[in-house]
Structure formats: C-alpha cells, structure tokens
Image: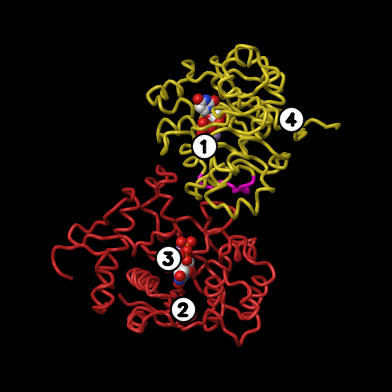
Chain colours: A red, B yellow
Amino acid sequence: MNVTRVHDESYVTLATNENYALGALTLGQSLRNTNTNRRLTVLITTEVPQLLVDQLKSVYDFVELVDVLDSQDSANLALLKRPELGVTFTKLHCWRLTQYRKCVFLDSDCLVLHNVDDLFNSEEFSAVSDIGWPDCFNSGVFVFRPSLDTYSRLLDFAVSQGSFDGGDQGLLNAFYPNWNRLSFVYNMTTNASYSYAPAYKQFKNTVKIVHFIGAQKPWYHTYNLDTQNVIGNVTVHEGDLINQWWRVFTQWVLPHLNNETKNRMRVQLVSRTPL
Amino acid sequence: MNVTRVHDESYVTLATNENYALGALTLGQSLRNTNTNRRLTVLITTEVPQLLVDQLKSVYDFVELVDVLDSQDSANLALLKRPELGVTFTKLHCWRLTQYRKCVFLDSDCLVLHNVDDLFNSEEFSAVSDIGWPDCFNSGVFVFRPSLDTYSRLLDFAVSQGSFDGGDQGLLNAFYPNWNRLSFVYNMTTNASYSYAPAYKQFKNTVKIVHFIGAQKPWYHTYNLDTQNVIGNVTVHEGDLINQWWRVFTQWVLPHLNNETKNRMRVQLVSRTPL
Ligand SMILES: O=c1ccn([C@@H]2O[C@H](COP(=O)(O)OP(=O)(O)O)[C@@H](O)[C@H]2O)c(=O)[nH]1
Ligand SMILES: O=c1ccn([C@@H]2O[C@H](COP(=O)(O)OP(=O)(O)O)[C@@H](O)[C@H]2O)c(=O)[nH]1
Ligand SMILES: [Mn+2]
Ligand SMILES: [Mn+2]
C-alpha cells in the first residue's frame, strides 16, 4: 500500500523502562498495521535497554531520549520537591515536540485495532471520558499541540497546584477543564467489557483503541503460544483483548527480541516447542 | 421561602411496588427540601399499597396510576411478546404526561442533594454518561418532552428492535443516539466513589443527585437509628451516601408510615429505643 506521509503530525508514546518498551513496541506495530500515514514517536529514558532502543527505532520514526528530572530547568528543579509527579512530568515532555504541528498521545499499554488517523482532525485538548468519573478524561489517549509555552505553563501548574490524583491525569484534567470529548471507541479501557457487558457486546466491533489500564498489563500475563490463549484468571472478554495484544506481540515483536530479553519473558510464554 | 410554581414542568419518577415507593417518598422529600418550584409527579401501578399511595400524595403534586400492560393499545399488545421489557415499558409512560411541556425523569433510587431546577434549561434528550460505557447515557436521570407521538414511536421501536440490554437504558440509548450530555454531578452513580476515588474526593461537594444503582438499594441496608450509620459491608464513601438517604427517610418519611409498614421495616432499623 502506498501511503503519503504527513510530516508534521505524529503519534507519541512514552516508555521509561523495559516492560513499557515492550508495550511501546506492540503499540507501534499495531499502529503500523493500520497503515497510518502519520509519524510515530516514542519518548524514552535511559533505563530502556539499548537493544530495545534499537528495536524501537525499527518501528518508530523517532526515538527521543528525555530526562525525568533535568537540573538545567528551574521548573523541573521545583518539581524535585514533588517526587510523586515524576512519571507525570515525563509524559509532559510530549509538549516539547515542536517539530510537529499536532500529535496524538497514546499510553504504551494501548493497542490500536483500526486506523485512527481521523483523530488528527480534532484539536487540543481532545480525549475520552474516564469511566471512573466521566466528567474527567482518561489521559491514556489525547490530541494535543506541542508548544514550549504550554509545556512551561503545565510545569508551573504542576508545581503550584499539584495533581488531585497524584498522576498526570489529575494534573491534565485540572489544566484542561474544557476538553473536547471523543468517542469511547478511541480509548476503550478494558474493564468496560464487564462494567456494562451488554454495551460491550453491542459496540465491541466499533472499538478502535484498547487501553489496558491497571496493574495487570498484558505483558505480565502468561500466554500459551500453542493455543494462542492467555492463561489464568481473566474474564472471557478481557481474555479476548489480551490475546489480541499477544498476537501482535508474538508475530511482530518477539521474533526480533534478543535471547536475554526472550529468556526473561519465557516465564510468561508457554509452548511445547522451544521459542 | 416563597416559591413561584411553574405549572407546566415536572419531575417524574416511577414506583411499581412498595419498596420502590419508599424510594419515591425519600426522593420526593429530598426534592422538596431543595425548594424546587417545579411540579412533582409519580407514576405508580396497582401493586403499591394504598397507604403508601396516600403518603405519596402528600409529597407529590400528582400520583398517576399506570398499567404495565394495557390491552387497549395495539403497540402494548405487541409488547406482550417481550415480557422482559415490562418495566421498561412502564417507564416509557412518562412521555404520556402531555399536561407538561418539559419534564425531568428521576429513578426512584435517586436522592437529590441540591436544587437541580436548572435541568429544565436543557432539552430532550439530555442525560449523563453511564460509567460502564460512557458513549451511552444512564437512564436514571433524563430531561424529556412529553409527547404521544414520541411515546408511540418508542413503543414501535421497542417492538421492532428490542433493547440491547433488556431494559429501558438499552432501548433509550438506541432511540436517542444523539443525546445531550449533562455533567456527572446530575447523576452520580454510587460506585463512582471507588471507581475513581481521587475524583470523588475532589468533586464530591459538587454532586447534586446521587443514584443508588444496582441490587443493593439503600432501603435494603440496615440502619442504626442511634448512631445514624448504616450497618454492614459497605465502603466508607458508599456508607456516607447511604446514610444521607436514611437521614431523609427517617426524618421525613418514617414518622408517617403506618405500623404495618414500620414493622416490615423494623428488620432494617436498629435502635435501643422503640420506634
Ligand atoms: O513506569 C512507568 C509508568 C508509566 N509509563 C508510561 O506512562 C503511561 C501511563 O501509565 P500506566 O499506563 O501504567 O497507567 P494506567 O493507564 O494503568 O492508569 C504508560 O502507558 C507508559 O506510557 C512508563 O513509561 N513507565
Ligand atoms: O421493580 C421495579 C424496578 C424498577 N422500578 C423503577 O425503575 C427504575 C429503574 O430500576 P432500578 O433503579 O432498579 O435500576 P438501576 O438503576 O439499579 O439500574 C427504579 O428506580 C424505579 O423507578 C420500579 O418501580 N419497580
Ligand atoms: Mn495506561
Ligand atoms: Mn436506578
């Protein structure tokens, strides 16, 4: 397929360690599979092992190294007093990507099922309701406009107001009280499959982005390569979603991992044939 | 307080039996406590005991008896083939209240904490996101315009399409795909107090209507009259909300109940002094 590339718009994700880098690889590959014509950018920190950085470079157009705490920057220094905002702060780096006119941020625990390039038709700040408190948005998927001015106002806000939930979501919701609402199909958090099961059944074929919120990320589950099924205590619908993540992972990411990483993952992979 | 009454706008609820009538009494009283200047209407069926009907008449301006299945009506007859839609159908009766220009429907398991007369500034069909699937609305609170035409189109739709969740919520969401979104503070479902606890903590003082969704209605809990606390296995925040329901119930509803009803309730009330 011949795709005209749009140079000044990018998907952006973040991975500060090996595990989230595996997520970013799977997410990036899932985006590539939709034939997106936008750029793919991943923000990483020095903790991500070099071999995964190399692999990220084969999926993403740009791999940007960012610091969690940059002592050169006075706003950052002030943030040192709020260590709980560390990861929050790292996500905020995405506003510094001023080589782009517009971006879509995606948590690295997202999986894209269908082309979502139409998200770039929305303006800053667009996001999806959080199903815990739907007047708030979930900060796992959002449309934004890189700007150093916004970046520094966000940092000032973080320092002066903090975050009502201790994370980037509370901060961004307080900063953007008048956000533009996108359909839930752009950020279907996996618990929706049981929080309103009939709606999930009715609308699941329209879902474009699945977001695996919570501590139990897909990469922490055990997956049986022979049956292509996740093993363990998950609902049928959650299992289906986790299986979709693992199918992208095993088909496009796993073959390129080095043996050390594969060995670390072996505990989570079950198969009668050696990897 | 002197309140100019608006005659062509009404709050509407529904109670098909004794338990939901206790809910409707508490809801109606909570509305009265906000000094609303709109009418209060309750739809009941013949199952509601006469003494509760009399008490409903002392709180509501209008008590309307409706049939669950009305054999005079051909659309209703067709509905007989879908017994699961019985309660759905009963809620739909609210569109027949054409003596009103505009209404706000409230489930009888709602409790109003602050004046919500500004809801009448919204148009049909306005409602609040369901936290299970936020592209859908929760059908416990909605603004509508009574109309016999809409009523019959809703019945036709129910007969031809059914409801994707077997209840009125699935039906109404399919019928009104382009609904107007109200803030969550007009229909805060009680599970939100733990589904996103920091947001609940941040925004709970702005909540205007609490909706006790699910099987465990406030009236099924046991309440200690001496400590003014619900007894049993509920989270702190849920307990606070259930206590608020019981405070309205014990102060304004309980004193007027007859002994038979009081005796039936005694199992749920604990006190060292006799009622
Ligand atoms: O240790 C961490 C925690 C988070 N993240 C990034 O921050 C996002 C938000 O965190 P997470 O997805 O774990 O939060 P949840 O969606 O479960 O609330 C992740 O998707 C990653 O992109 C990261 O790189 N390293
Ligand atoms: O047996 C019933 C069930 C429901 N209802 C009415 O229908 C509404 C919706 O039902 P419910 O509140 O139980 O559903 P939930 O909000 O828990 O989904 C109730 O609040 C009542 O107004 C009723 O009168 N009798
Ligand atoms: Mn996430
Ligand atoms: Mn209800």
Q: Which residue is disc 1 drawn over?
A: B233
Q: Position of residue B218 (x, y in %)?
A: 57, 31
Q: Amino acid at mark 4?
A: Arg
Is disc 4 placed on a helix, strand or loop?
helix
Which residue is depicted at the point 63% across and 52% down?
A: B201
Q: Which mark is residue A43?
A: 2
Decide: is B67 above or below A15: above
Q: Using the rendered image, report if marks 4 and 1 lie on a common chain.
A: yes
Decide: is B65 above or below B220: above
Residue B242 on the magenta span: no
Q: Are marks 3 and 2 in contact (CB under 8 Å)?
A: no
Asked whether, in this view, residue B207 is left or right of residue A205, the answer is right
Report whether the residue tagged 1 is closer than 8 Å to ligand 2: no
Which residue is depicted at the point 43% across and 20% down?
A: B77
Q: Which mark is residue A116?
A: 3
Determine the chain carrying the residue at label 3: A
Quarter-wise, where is residue B270 in the image?
A: top right
Query: Which residue, as the protein is rendered here, is positioned at the far front?
Result: B272
Q: Using the rendered image, report if marks 4 and 3 lie on a common chain.
A: no
**Quadrant location of ligand 4?**
top right
Q: Amino acid at mark 3?
A: Val
Asked whether, in this view, residue A155 is left or right of residue A184, the answer is right
Question: How far apart are the two marked residues, 3 and 1, measured between alpha carbons?
Answer: 44 Å
Determine the chain carrying the residue at label 4: B
Q: Position of residue B275 (x, y in %)?
A: 67, 18
Label 3 crowd (10 A; few <14 / some 14-19 / many >=20): some
Q: Which residue is disc 4 drawn over?
A: B32
Q: Amino acid at mark 2?
A: Leu
Q: Position of residue B98 (x, y in %)?
A: 64, 27
